[in-house]
Image (cartoon, rainbow, N blue to C red):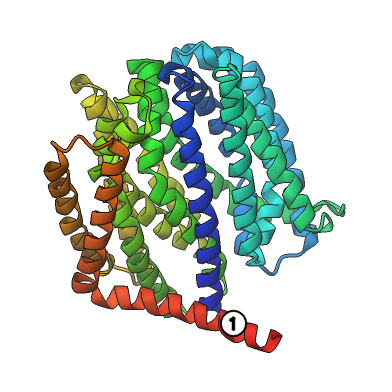
Amino acid sequence: MSLAQKAAAGFLWTTGANVGSRILTIISTFILTRFLPPEAQGEVYAALVFVQTFAVATSLGVGQYIAANPSEGRETAFHGTVLLLGAGALACAILFFGRFAAADILAAPSVVVYAPALALSHFLDRLGWLPRYILVREMRFRMVGLRLALGELTYAVTTVLFAYWGYGGWAIVVGNLARALVALVFLFFVTSWRDYLQPCKLAWSTMSKILSYGVPVSVANTFHMAAQQWDNGFMVRRFGEETLGLYNQAYRLADLPATNVGEQINDVLVPTFARLTDVEARRRGLLRAASLMALVVFPMATGIGAVAKTLVEACYAPSYAGVAPFLTAISALSMSRSIGILAGGYLQVTGRTRIFALLDFLLVVSVLAFMWLFAPWGPIASAIGVGVAFTLNVLFIVMSLRSEGISVSSVLLALVRPFLACAPMVASVYGIRATMGDTGWHAGIRVGIEVLVGAVVYAGAALLIARKISRDFIDLGLSMVRRKRGAAKPAE
């Protein structure tokens, strides 16, 4: 199998597992709203802001180094394990003793209650970082996808059960613990412990090599995480825990396309680009990936915003009706996020991690600045500031790729046709909603019709407006099917 086919297969496996597992998680979230009011979920999310900040800040970029350097052996992996676990122990200590100060900063007393258990959940998850990145390095994407699906299934079932039993916000905490533990056990079974735990003599030269590459990545990841999590901190401090509960629900839905597609592309393309020595081949690969990604992500992002009102009416408890305006306001977030993830992964492979860190620093500053600037007009306007900040950040990232032979215009040309194909889809959704307005049909039926009409219209528009990209996408899928059939015949 060629490297391109391996990358495509990896993308299909990881994306398929991610989409399936996240759909399950979203369904469980809809069920949770029947048992947990918005303020209960907001209390846990406020604590998660604190925990995830120090979890990412102490990651040291070890996993990314392992994935981007496929020729490194077990000794390097063991050095990475020592760094990860040592930094993780320090993070847990900070989380435990610093939770009182964090509660004061966020104006959320719940941080004191939930932070210790969430810190334990993080450490369990951290134990699985190295084996997961080793699977990525070896391009064993099927196992990566299965691990994700199993963990999300565990989280969905656990949270719903404990919420039904009346544990309140603790249902989410227990779900995080269960997910981390099950995923860790799975990774231990599908990897060899010797690949990352076999002891060897520690050498500072190896440590420094990992840290010189990984620390800038870790700093950048911290800023990037802050851009996605510190908005929660702003919301809870400025507008309260109930508003945070509504906003976070909308953000999770709006971010689904970037999470399910954009991040999976990054996982696949980092080891793929690392194996390409031809700069021109990398450039072509990035532009091709951008156009194919846009063909999938853009309609998902704009479509979620278009059906937001009916979707929330159909799936959420009445107390969560406020999710709809938030979702419409930030629905385009995934378009910017996914492009930024793709371009950031390219910077990571080329070793330009310091500029990556600077760009993400500017991102978190701009997110908080635009939220603060728009806050006098209310929480919805403040949420729009998040989308504005991410759009500007993508422009800066693409501009930083100029030295790699990638121009802003070339990226825009790769994206413009899939974007234009979304316009007829959005218009058709609003049109069919207006037509069904007086039918009295259940919201679940109406949202299903809106999605179906939008999908059909987009498929036709994409084949008409983005014909070349659509054909490339179809041909890539057919080549994967033919390859599988060809492999099955000799087995028979």
Q: Is residue 491 visible?
A: yes
Toward the viewer: 431 or 14? 431
- Residue that lies at the very extreme toward the bottom in this rendered image: 490
Q: Position of residue 480 (x, y in %)?
A: 51, 77
The correct choice, above or below, for 331 with respect to 402 in the image is: above
Q: Is residue 212 visible?
A: no
The quadrant of the picture occupied by the N terminus is bottom right
The quadrant where residue 468 appears:
bottom left
Name the residue rendered at 63%, 44% in the picture. Answer: 151
The quadrant where residue 458 appears:
bottom left
Q: Is mark 1 on a helix, strand or loop?
A: loop
Q: Mark 1 points at which residue?
A: 1
Neighbours of disc 1 within 10 Å: few (<14), some (14-19), many (20+): few
Toward the viewer: 19 or 27? 27
Q: Position of residue 427 (x, y in %)?
A: 14, 52
The correct choice, above or below, for 288 with respect to 152 in the image is: below
Q: Position of residue 429 (x, y in %)?
A: 19, 49
Name the residue rendered at 64%, 47% in the picture. Answer: 150
The correct choice, above or below, for 100 with respect to 61 in the image is: above
Kindly identify the amino acid type of the residue bearing the numbered disc 1: Met
Name the residue rendered at 65%, 34% in the picture. Answer: 122
Q: Where is residue 108 in the image (x, y as percent from the top left)?
A: 47, 13
Name the residue rendered at 57%, 79% in the picture. Answer: 484
The quadrant of the picture occupied by the C terminus is bottom right
Toward the viewer: 346 or 186? 186
Q: How many marks?
A: 1
